[in-house]
Amino acid sequence: MEETKILTWENKKEAVRILKKGGIVAFPTDTVYGLAVISSRPEPSQISLLPLCAEVWAWLLNTLK
């Protein structure tokens, strides 16, 4: 299992490295958290997710690994 890292804006290059290695990056927005991944799916088939609670986030992160 991959480790969880807390990154700041100053070490955003680490987030890019994680994405390029196939990892998942969660980030806050004004209202919800977002998930970033580099998808190999064609653009029209990409999806957006809006989990309702922390338990759903945990399930998603474990499922998508």
Image (spheres, rainbow, N blue to C red):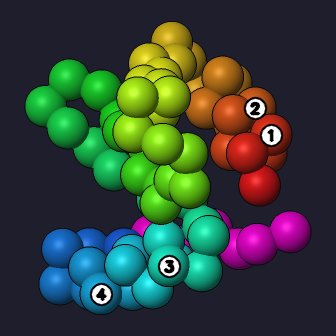
Q: Is residue 52 above or below residue 2?
A: above
For disc 2, the marked residue is: 59
Query: Which residues lie in the magenta part?
Result: 1-6
Q: In the picture provided, is 28 more to the left or to the right than 18?
A: left
> Spatial distance from mark 3 to mark 1, Cα to Cα?
19 Å
Dot 1 and dot 2 residues touching (CB under 8 Å): yes
Question: Can residue 37 be seen in the rendering of this structure?
Answer: yes
- Dot 4 amino acid type: Lys
> Residue shown at 30%/87% (left/top)?
13
Q: Residue at x 80, y 40 (%)?
A: 63
Disc 1 residue type (three-letter): Thr
The local secondary structure at tag 2 comes to helix
Sequence-wise, which precedes: disc 3 or disc 1?
A: 3
- Mark whose residue sits in front, 3 or 1: 3
Quick check: marks 4 and 2 in contact, CB under 8 Å? no
- Give the distance between the C-alpha atoms of the residues marked 1 and 4, in whole angstroms: 25 Å
